[in-house]
Image (cartoon, grey):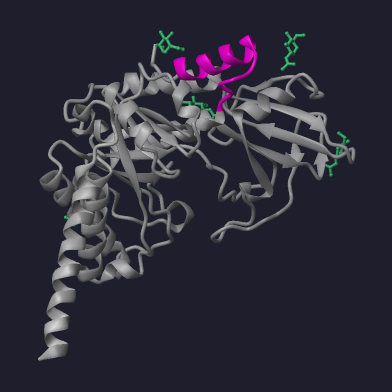
Amino acid sequence: MKSSGGGGGARLLTAILFALHLRLAVGACPCQDPALCKPISSPRDFEVFVFDVGGKTWKNYNWSLITTVATFGKYDPELMCYAHSKGSRVVLKGDISVKKIIDPAIRAAWISQQVDLAKTQYMDGINIDIEQHINPFSAEYYALTALVKETTDAFHKEIPGSQVTFDVPWSPGCIDWRCYNYTGIADSCDFLFVMSYDEQSQVWSHCIARANAPFNQTLAGYDDYIFMGINQKKLVMGVPWYGYDYTCQNLSETHECTIQKIPFRGAPCSDAAGRQVPYKIIMSQVNSSLSGILWDEEQKAPYLEYKDSRDVFHQVWFDDPRSISQKAAYVKKHGLRGIGMWNADCLEYSGSFEMQQQTEAMWDALMPK
Ligand SMILES: *[C@@H]1O[C@H](CO)[C@@H](O)[C@H](O)[C@H]1NC(C)=O
Ligand SMILES: *[C@@H]1O[C@H](CO)[C@@H](O)[C@H](O)[C@H]1NC(C)=O
Ligand SMILES: *[C@@H]1O[C@H](CO)[C@@H](O)[C@H](O)[C@H]1NC(C)=O
Ligand SMILES: *[C@@H]1O[C@H](CO)[C@@H](O)[C@H](O)[C@H]1NC(C)=O
Ligand SMILES: *[C@@H]1O[C@H](CO)[C@@H](O)[C@H](O)[C@H]1NC(C)=O
């Protein structure tokens, strides 16, 4: 009796603590104006989808353009309140092992956890970023489509007007062995964010440094998504605000930079031989480079060359307002849902007047002319 009575008391105490915890978690809106904790449900037509990777530089983003911020850094309530005050959505990052999601119970538990997290943080949806290897028609292949559908259904039901999106590679052709059911996934969510970068992750021809997102290769990816039956309004173009710095084994006079052979998911060489660098770092190297900014007409991309302290040549490929605006023109011409970038924290928001102009030009290049 005694011990069971004690257990009852402990259970009651647990229940009270749990209720208090819920009240604190869901109850306390961190914004000065409690109205800012309401989800954003009537967004603008043209999507500008931004990835934030943490820190406070978000204060200097061009908020007049942004419709959604996917927060891949630590949750920042101040960012949520600010974004809502600008009519922009804030969404979670979602990732889970594709081995686990074969079990429907694990999927359901994961989804309910994500919905609860979004609710307690007053967020407006989730961006699912699963970049894992999946074989076509495997158990994981079917489970992934189911995961996206079930997540979308749960979010739309629990947070009316919320947004569920999924990140896909630059082409639907089993890139990096991501052989997903792209049409099924597109049907099951609000839209796909197409990661039109890292396009040299699998290089099958000779191993030289190339553009991160060559013009033709990028647009061919969208043509392929549309050709397979995905509505253009389900596609948001993702452009890179970072580039790749390659160490050249040899740099020829025709600007061919031979790179180390590093295989990736079956291909003999890869951009894994390079190092990812934010746009702001690349811009700070221009004056001390050997070449200044060069332009490759075939790939419609800028690059530069420099010699490091060990006297070794480097070639750096990147995107700038010129290359981005040419891609953005496709968004308008083909009626895509919008545009976005990885990631907004690659720009310099506190430098000289000249640097701030460069930053503004990068935001401006997103808007198709
Ligand atoms: C893709 O998913 C959809 C929706 O679940 C399904 O109807 C379709 O048969 C799948 N397609 C392939 C090729 O697996
Ligand atoms: C290496 O670069 C030099 C200088 O441009 C060039 O003359 C030579 O042919 C290149 N060697 C190879 C193996 O590409
Ligand atoms: C690079 O050089 C230009 C022209 O001389 C100058 O206006 C600019 O301030 C320099 N930029 C940096 C980052 O040093
Ligand atoms: C790019 O695509 C256009 C149109 O399809 C074609 O005319 C052009 O030759 C291509 N350029 C390269 C470098 O592949
Ligand atoms: C934000 O972008 C808009 C549209 O491109 C532009 O008119 C405005 O000047 C930009 N604001 C800032 C602070 O750069």
Tell me if residue 45 comes above or below residue 216 in the rendering: above
Q: Quadrant of ligand 3?
A: top right
Question: Residue at the spot x=59%, y=51% of the render?
Answer: 204
- Image quadrant where one finds the C terminus: top left
Position of residue 303 measured from the top left corner of the image (x, y, whole percent): 67, 27
Magenta-drawn stretch, dominant element (helix, strand or loop): helix
Q: Nearer the viewer, residue 42 or 228?
A: 42
Q: Quadrant of residue 3?
A: bottom left
**x and y, in percent, of residue 202 in the image:** 56, 51
Q: Residue at left 49%, top 31%?
A: 56
The number of callouts visible is 0
- Within the image, what quadrant is residue 238 found in? top left
For the point 31% across and 30% down, the residue is: 81
First to last magenta residue range: 347-364
**Residue positioned most to the bottom:** 1
- Tell me, yes or no, if residue 319 can be seen here: yes
In the rendered image, residue 98, in percent from the top left (x then y), is placed at 35, 64
- Tell whether 148 sits left or right of 311: left
Magenta stretch encompasses residue 358: yes
**Is 88 on the left-hand or right-hand side of 260?**
left
Above or below for 46 versus 167: above
Report whether residue 240 is seen: no
Up/down of 98 relative to 309, above or below: below
**Left or right of 288 in this view: 241:** left
x and y percentages locating residue 129 in the rendered image? 38, 49
Task: Tell me the quarter of the image containing the N terminus.
Answer: bottom left
For the point 82% across and 34% down, the residue is 252
Determine whether, in the image, residue 2 is placed left or right of residue 30.
left
Residue 239 falls inside the magenta stretch: no
Nearer to the camera, 109 or 197: 109
Identify which residue, 366 or 329, lies in the foreground. 366
